[in-house]
Amino acid sequence: MRKLSFAVVGAGHGGKAMAAHLALKGFPVKLYNRTLSKIDPIIKMKGIEIEGEINGFGKLDLASDKIGDVVKDADIIMVVVPAFAHASIAERCAPYLKDGQIILLNPGRTCGALEFLNILRERGNTSDVIVSEAQTFIYASRGMGPASVKIFRIKQAIPVAAIPAVRTEAALDKINQAYPEFISATSVIETSFNNIGAVFHPAITILNASRIESTLGNFQFYVEGVTQAVSRVLEEVDRERVEVAHTLRCKNVLSAMDWLIMAYNVVEDNLFDAIHSNPGYVGIMAPRTSNVRYITEDVPMSLVPIAEFGRVFGVKTPTTDSLIKLANVIFKTDFIKTGRNLTRLRLDNLNLDEIRNVFIEGAPKRLF
Amino acid sequence: MRKLSFAVVGAGHGGKAMAAHLALKGFPVKLYNRTLSKIDPIIKMKGIEIEGEINGFGKLDLASDKIGDVVKDADIIMVVVPAFAHASIAERCAPYLKDGQIILLNPGRTCGALEFLNILRERGNTSDVIVSEAQTFIYASRGMGPASVKIFRIKQAIPVAAIPAVRTEAALDKINQAYPEFISATSVIETSFNNIGAVFHPAITILNASRIESTLGNFQFYVEGVTQAVSRVLEEVDRERVEVAHTLRCKNVLSAMDWLIMAYNVVEDNLFDAIHSNPGYVGIMAPRTSNVRYITEDVPMSLVPIAEFGRVFGVKTPTTDSLIKLANVIFKTDFIKTGRNLTRLRLDNLNLDEIRNVFIEGAPKRLF
């Protein structure tokens, strides 16, 4: 069997970890980054040093800021960029993607695959590609230098879904040749709503806004940042998310509590204790500024679509709305307008069955 | 001229400062407190030690937990309790108040005088009393012991208004015999909306919620607690408050910036710098828990009525609403229901002119 070839889009620490690891697994890998200077050392070294769980040198076939050169012949395109960059990556890829290619967003946050596919179609790309999203990023990793990265942990059993869901198995058949860790989710509703980062990151950041700014993040984000008051807000945001998912008839959505139990074997009966008994959170420091992806990614790309689905289907999400509003005020922006609102997702004016159809069977009257 | 007699209701540090100071000024003073044990030392000493700006021993005619004994013969009743206790004080005073007595809430927060008067009338008290409210508390004071108090500063030019405003001069004629510091406000709209505590306290507390809980308030509330992110939220809450006041045709409402300029001679062009250049804020520590009057008083007694007036008169107050919602979640309560909503203020179903009439001329069709 011919080895699958990979494109990795994005050379942050996550993209570097994935590119190097895939290369060490023996797959041909090309790496794209928008800013050339950032990958200059990788170009010079022709690859990436990797340490931690995996050790070695991942030799790359190409590292480039020309996205066409990187993606056009890849069997699988791994997108490893913040969710707010998915749209621009889709725009730049649209001229090059062709039948049979598979795109996986690592991760999609909420409705990333749908947004990506919409943009391909609107840019006139009607090829038979499969766009899919992972529920979370597979690696816990950290950049160690311009061409080196450390992998602390490789996560197991990461749900993946394609849009529509009927294409998921075809995508996983190929993706699993490199990554057996990815498993099948029922649909992108599941991967989009089982997004615990959206519950934890914005609420903890906003309720620690002044502390982050005045201490430059010099405190433990979860251990010190999640107090009883904060945990009550987390519980409400979580409850609203789960309720919206249930309204979309997603059965596999986990509460944050259940997720902590599943992911970390935590055994507690409330979210505050569950967070504080999770050794995985010890030592994770707060970000150094409040201008962080915990807001700029999680609010527009996750809280906004969750609140939008709630609004359309009559689920009240006042706590989520309050966090979005405060984020808007703090960042002097309008994350509802810039984020994944239903207009941007091309789901406005659809009823519940029509939306589920877009996610699950594919919408025959639409371009895809 | 016969010396006016005073009742002081509430024996926190503020009530103690006022009772002792009035006694030292030579007025007969009786002091009420709901919890007898708290005033036992005052009863034994027959008065209160006072130090700081004023020094001496304020001898009281009575200190008691029988509110009737304290208020029934007083010319002026000074209420010095948190705003959330105004209603229960009004209920307990209702059987005893009679023609000619003056009640002054120190301070009223937002619509305290209206709430107090409504309750008197609903309890069947139709006597010709004047209920008024001060815009802020006259003393900066601190309790030093069970029967002693320190006055750091006596504020000047404190606006007072009666409900309705046509009664303000009659109230001040008497109050000024003891306190020339009180001046006439145009109406309780002015005293109720020029409430800078409502802008600063809840927003700073909520955006420092975890820091307060995890450090037990071991940081400077304004100096460290107001960062750029927090100041942007303060600016929005302030803008919403001023806009609602303007809709009620209150011309004398000050922005927080203008108030800092007026009260502290601060000269800056933005709220962040104005707060940080105010030496009056240096050394003010955060509260030790987030379960503080900064929330339990300012949210239901000020932010709620401001948002309620906004809702009825078409002024959007999304930032204020967000803070109320987060306070509700953090405190597991419903401050809109427990607070000064328009139903509780008996202003529901009134139009703007009718509401202004209640505040300014008195509403002839109502009991008062």
Image: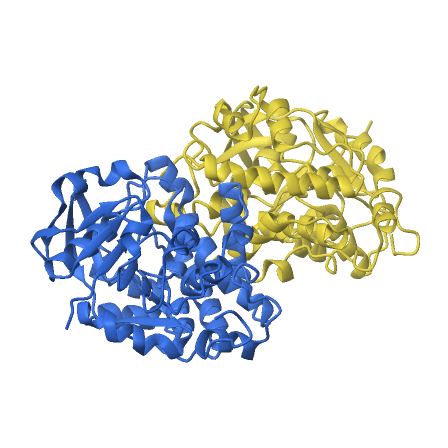
Chain colours: A yellow, B blue
Location of residue B254 with respect to A28 vertically, above or below: below
Quarter-wise, where is residue B52 in the image? bottom left
Q: Which residue is drawn at 27% across and 59% down?
A: B73
Q: On the rendered structure, is A338 left or right of B74?
A: right
Q: Check the picture and name the quadrant holding the N terminus of chain B.
A: bottom left
Residue B280, x across and y down, in percent: 21, 59
Q: On the rendered structure, is A129 left or right of B7?
A: right
Quarter-wise, where is residue B233 in the image? bottom left
Q: Which residue is drawn at 17% across and 42% down?
A: B42
* Residue A2 seen in the current view: yes
Location of residue B105 with respect to B207 vertically, above or below: below
Location of residue A151 with respect to A193 vertically, above or below: above
Q: On the rendered structure, is B27 left or right of A10?
A: left
Residue B303, x across and y down, in percent: 47, 59
Q: Residue at x 55, y 57 (%)?
A: A325
Outermost residue toward the left in this view:
B56
Residue B149, x across and y down, in percent: 16, 48
Location of residue A353 with respect to B233 vertically, above or below: above
Quarter-wise, where is residue A108 in the image? top right
Residue B282, x across and y down, in percent: 22, 54
Q: Which of B197 and B231 is in front in this view?
A: B197
